[in-house]
Amino acid sequence: MPMVEKNFPTVSAEAKPLIHLISNKKLFMTNLSVTKLFQPLTLNCGATLKNRFVLAPLTNSQSHVDGTLSDEEYHWLTLRAQGGFALTMTCAAHVQAEGQGFPGQLGIFSDHHLDGLTRLASGIKQHDSLALVQLHHAGMRSPADLIGQTPLCPSDNAETGARGMTTAEVEQLTEDFIVAAERAEKAGFEGVEIHGAHGYILAQFLSSTINQRDDQYGGSLDNRGRIIRDIIDGVRARCSSNFILGLRLSPERFDVQLADMLAFTQTILSDGKIDFLDMSLWDVFKEPQEEAFQGRTLLSYFTELERGNIALGIAGKLRTPEEIRQAMAADIDFVLLGRAAILHHDYPLQMQADDDFQPVANPVSVEHLRSEGLSETFVDYMRNWTGFVAD
């Protein structure tokens, strides 16, 4: 695809009224996007978000060693629900003990986690925010010294030392994702998001380079996407009809090809079995990495897909109200805020009161992060993000 021409012609006097009309249309779309931000969004399953702000699933390392909920993680998440987010999502919660991806990760692989999960779901819903768990397995990205065994992968992976899974293990992984969704519903959560992004195990299955299987889970794109479709079918069959089901995908990095991701995403959208699609784009305004697709935004490839009634949300460096307005004007349904929500637990309320409020700039003080509900453990984790914390 050719690059967009950068040399713009001189505007004639005859064209100026048209330019003025286009400018007014852009202003109208921006104003419309502000209004849309604070309108309800009803999903296919019947659940309604009170606005278009969703807390992105964020690693925070605050859970106990056994994956049970800590008071610190409860406080961090319920404070965001109190701050006006219509949907509050947990960090990635691992569905198998051997799928843990980082220390202090929330678990959902055992009924031992139910008490904490039940408390958390109740605490989030008390603030008129929908409560969701993100379901996760790190696969080859599980540190061996953390899980105490060789990490799993669709195929043997020399770079990470992960071993390929047997067909029976893939079937068990599928079952454990489904059981984790049932466990989330039992705990009182109103839905789950399946984590199929960022190079974790489901994304590893989607990769034509990482996934070298020769059974029904490898080879063609249809086979490589089978595990995700089977999980979706299982959750739909075994959870309530009003249970929210979302899917997170990322279309770049981690050995996936954009053409494959576009085709797979369209398949999922056409199936119509999920309630929302969460596209993690790293930067919602960037162009694709692959040269053949450059000349337009990465986001535009996904907004032009036929999505029926499935809601589309995006995440990636949305920090300011102006950036959020621009994103909403690009034909999406909601935004997921990560770093912006770390800096301001009440971002939706602040923007509703002043749609041009200026978020605090990084680096921020430890005192500010503490005031926003981050524990010392979470603050230490954020120090891994260059330029985020002032020391």
Image (cartoon, rainbow, N blue to C red):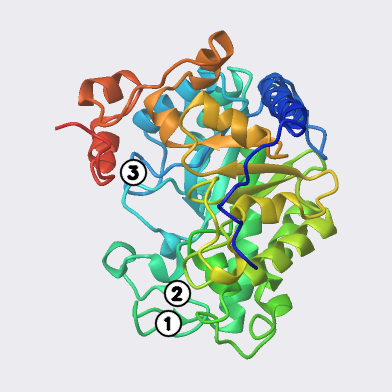
Q: Residue at x 31, y 69 (%)?
A: 144
What is the C-alpha distance between the residues marked 1 and 2? 5 Å
* Marks 1 & 2, CB-CB < 8 Å contact: yes
The residue at the far front in this view is: 13
Residue placed under numbered mark 1 in the picture? 163
Residue placed under numbered mark 2 in the picture? 152
Q: Secondary structure at mark 1?
A: strand
* Marks 1 & 3, CB-CB < 8 Å contact: no
Q: Which mark is residue 260?
A: none
What is the C-alpha distance between the residues marked 1 and 3? 26 Å
Q: Is residue 101 above or below residue 29?
A: below
Residue 188 seen anywhere in this rendered image of the structure: no
Indicate left or right for 55 with 237 as reference. Answer: left
Q: Is residue 225 above or below residue 239?
A: below
What is the C-alpha distance between the residues marked 2 and 3? 22 Å
Comes first in the chain, label 2 or label 3:
3
Q: Quadrant of residue 355?
A: top right
Q: Which mark is residue 61?
A: 3
Q: Position of residue 195 (x, y in %)?
A: 56, 55
Q: Quadrant of the C terminus?
A: top left
Identify residue type, mark 1: Arg
The residue at the far left in this view is: 391
**Total number of numbered labels?**
3
Residue 153 seen anywhere in this rendered image of the structure: yes
Q: Quadrant of residue 230?
A: bottom right
Identify residue type, mark 2: Leu
Indicate left or right for 161 with 46 as reference. Answer: left
Q: Residue at x 66, y 28 (%)?
A: 52
Q: Position of residue 50 (x, y in %)?
A: 70, 21
